[in-house]
Amino acid sequence: IIGAGRDATIFDQSGTGDHFMEITSSATNITISDMTIQDYDEGDAGGAIDITTTGTVTIQDVNFHNNSSTSHGGAIYTAASTDVTIDRCKFTSNTTTGYGDNGGAIGSYGDITIKNCLFYDNSVGSSSYNGIIYQRNGTANIVNCTFADNTGSGEPVYSYSGTTNIVNCIFKDN
């Protein structure tokens, strides 16, 4: 799915209680790019996008704004056995609240690469062990990202288990 640009292709939820997209089963080689996804509020995991496929998913040049979930990943949730790359995306004002409110922007349980992204003004409902990015199992590579003015968590990136590599990132006022 390729949009016409972040300012030209905007998906804005008109109702309540669902995410923009769910990528399931063995869907593979999925690319989502050049758009804004905003104002989605999921009653479970993945406020904007819920990824449970065993295939590969690339998300590039997407703005995620004001999305929320009551579980894992205010904007994006990735399940175990996923392989996701997120590049040049902006995460602003996303949140997760409720039981298991892990990952104000991203809740990841699989392999994930996050690079060249901005995380600004995101939040989680409880104050510890949750992270704006929550990583459990798998490997997370976080490269050239900026985390600024995120709230509700003692740590911008929380790694529960698995391997997390953070390279050349900026953390300010989190």
Image: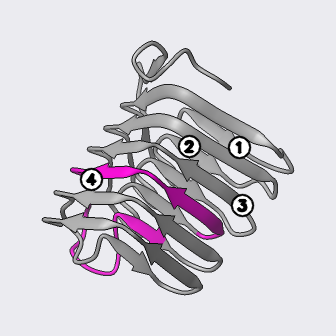
Place of residue 89 in the rendered image (x, y in percent of width and height, measured from the top left): 45, 43
Name the kind of residue labelled 1 in the image. Ile
Whether residue 41 is situated above or below residue 83 in the rendered picture: above
**Which one is in front in this view, the residue at disc 3 or the one at disc 1?**
3
Colouring scheme, one of rainbow, by chain, secondary structure, one colour: one colour
Label 4 Cα crowd, 10 Å radius (few <14 / some 14-19 / many 20+) = many
Name the kind of residue labelled 4 in the image. Asn
The numbered disc on residue 83 is: 3
The reply to whether the magenta stretch includes residue 122 is yes
- The residue tagged 1 is 23
Residue at 36% from the left image edge and 31% from the top image edge? 39
Q: Secondary structure at mark 2?
A: strand
Contact, CB < 8 Å: mark 1 with mark 4? Answer: no
The residues tagged by marks 1 and 2 sit, at their Cα atoms, a distance apart of 8 Å
The residues tagged by marks 1 and 4 sit, at their Cα atoms, a distance apart of 23 Å
The numbered disc on residue 49 is: 2
Contact, CB < 8 Å: mark 1 with mark 2? Answer: yes
Q: Which residues are magenta?
A: 109-134
- The residue tagged 4 is 122
The numbered disc on residue 154 is: none
